[in-house]
Amino acid sequence: DTGVSQDPRHKITKRGQNVTFRCDPISEHNRLYWYRQTLGQGPEFLTYFQNEAQLEKSRLLSDRFSAERPKGSFSTLEIQRTEQGDSAMYLCASSPDRVLTEAFFGQGTRLTVV
Amino acid sequence: TQLLEQSPQFLSIQEGENLTVYCNSSSVFSSLQWYRQEPGEGPVLLVTVVTGGEVKKLKRLTFQFGDARKDSSLHITAAQPGDTGLYLCAGAWWGRGSARQLTFGSGTQLTVLP
């Protein structure tokens, strides 16, 4: 399977704990995105990487959130001191470096903060 | 902030009926995509439209991009239960420089009853 892979698929954590999610993009894609989606809503942009450079971050990405993409390959999204409001589906997508912004999504990580 | 409005928000129809969902913005899109998402999964790309007035067909699905590139529609002919899902439109605006992130609408939840 050469699609976008996310791990874990589901994560339940207690409020105040830290969590880390991983995304492996399609291998030839230079761009990588993180989105967050809550029930009944469309995905909301969090951050974007072009290779290893983090080029844009949404205001939704508070200082408790950090994302990395070392060596321009896989990416991690860490949430520190989780809050119940962080409960959501976290989606990763990758895109080739072409003019059109076609994003290919992984299956997501469902986070539940209890 | 560019906003995308989708309508209707919910749509429940009988198998065999036709339907149209809409995606509108006050800004001109550089490109627009339609995705379908099933519960617990990431969005799956259906089509990308770029040129004003463009029409693309994917089996029973017809996608149209408005002449002014500010709106789009998705028409499904003879809907089937397998078409059930959340239909999302997403737009990209090149005017944001290197940021090629997509902005999503809130989606149309389609249910096709057998």
Image (cartoon, coloured by chain):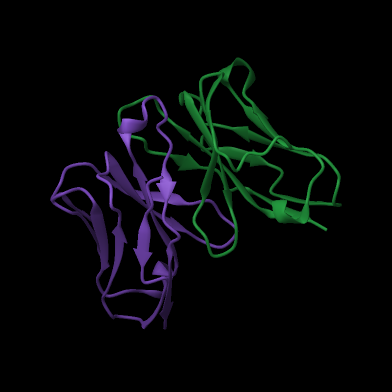
Chain colours: A green, B purple
- Horizontal and vertical percent position of residue A49: 52, 26
Q: Tell me which residue sits at (37%, 54%) in the image.
A: B4
- Quarter of the picture holding the C terminus of chain B: bottom left
- Horizontal and vertical percent position of residue B44: 44, 50
- Horizontal and vertical percent position of residue A114: 83, 58
Q: Is residue A75 above or below residue B109?
A: above
Q: Tell me which residue sits at (38%, 52%) in the image.
A: B3
Q: Is residue B56 above or below residue A63?
A: below
Q: Tell me which residue sits at (54%, 31%) in the image.
A: A25
* Image-based side of A56 in relation to A5, left or right: left
| Residue in the foreground of this view, choosing between B95 and A9 | B95
Can residue A53 be spotted in the picture?
A: yes
Q: Is residue A51 above or below residue B1?
A: above
Name which quarter of the figure residue A61 lies in.
top right
Q: Residue furthest top?
A: A71
- Quarter of the picture holding the N terminus of chain B: top left
- Horizontal and vertical percent position of residue B46: 35, 51
Labels in figure, total: 0
Q: Tell me which residue sits at (35%, 81%) in the image.
A: B15
